Image: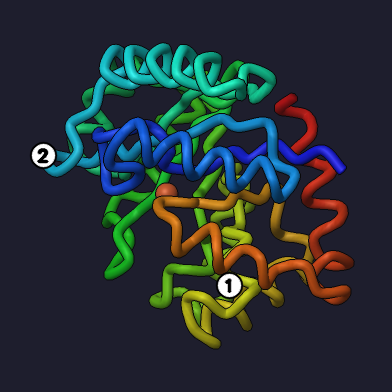
Amino acid sequence: MDFVDIHSHLLPGIDDGAKSMEDTIALISKLDTMGVQNFITTPHVLGSVWQNSSDTILDKLELVQEALEKNDLGYIKIDAAAEYMLDEQFCKLLKERDLLTIKEDNLLVEMSYFSAPVNLFEMLFDIQLAGYNPILAHPERYNFYHQKFDMYEKLKNAGCRFQINLLSLTGYYGPAVKKTAIKLIENNMIDFAGSDVHHEKHVSALQKLGTKANLKLLDPILKNNLQFL
Ligand SMILES: [Fe+2]
C-alpha cells in the first residue's frame, strides 16, 4: 500500500541525517525497494546546533530532486518541511511565520528527550493561535512521560496530534519505548506515523517492522498518513 513518510532526515549535510548526496540517494533507493515512494522529509531546526532556515532546506530539496532524476528515481515524490525543536529560536520563527509545514498548516515539533519545556502548553497554544496545527514527533520516546500517561492525554486535549516512529514498534529504542508506543496506539492516541530515518542502520532496522501484529496495529495510522499525498 501507499505510505507517505512525514518524518525523515534525508536532505544531505544539513542535520544529523544523510551526510552526502550519495547517502541521500542510497537511503531513498533502499526505502523505495521497501515500498516507500512518497516523502515529506523533515530536517532538524534546533537552536544553534542545526540552524536551518526555510531557504537552506528548500535549496537542498531542489538539489535532491535533481539528483533523483539523474539517478532514474524521478518517480519518487519528495517534499520538505522541518522538525522544529520547541525552543527559543522556534518562538522567534513562529513570530515571523517563517516555518515549513507538512501540507498546508501541519507543523512537526519535538522536544528534548530529557524534559519538556516549562512553557510547553503556552507554546502549543501560540502555535495554534498563529494558525498552525502541531504534530508532536515520537511522543513514545519522551521517557519522562512513560509513568505519567495522563500527560499524553493533556497534550492531545491541548490540540496536539501525535506521530509515532515506526522503529519504536521494532524495539529499536528499547522495550519501554515499544511498550508506550503500543499503549498509545491501543488508546487511539496516535494520528500519524513516520520513519524518522537518519541513516542506513535505521533503514535496515525497519525491515523488522512487518510482523502481523505490527501491521494490524499500524493499518489505520498508515492510512491516515495518506491525507498528505
Ligand atoms: Fe526526527
- Observer-nearest of 135 and 218: 218
Find residue 187 and report its horizontal and vertical position in percent: 77, 69
Comparing labels 1 and 2, the label whose residue is closer to the camera: 2
Residue shown at 32% from the left, 40% from the top: 44
Which residue is the extreme one toward the front?
A: 71
Q: Is residue 54 shown left or right of residue 5?
A: left
Q: Which residue is mark 2?
A: 48
Find residue 34 and report its horizontal and vertical position in percent: 71, 50
What number is the disc on residue 188? Answer: none
Q: Is residue 193 shown left or right of residue 215?
A: left
Vertical arrangement, residue 132 with respect to residue 115, above or below: above
- Observer-nearest of 35 and 135: 35
User: What's the amino acid at mark 2?
Assistant: Ser
Find residue 65 and report its horizontal and vertical position in percent: 49, 16
Residue shown at 75% from the left, 40% from the top: 3
User: What's the amino acid at mark 1?
Assistant: Asp
Q: Which residue is mark 1?
A: 150
Residue shown at 63% from the left, 75% from the top: 170
Write down the quadrant of residue 216 in the picture: bottom right
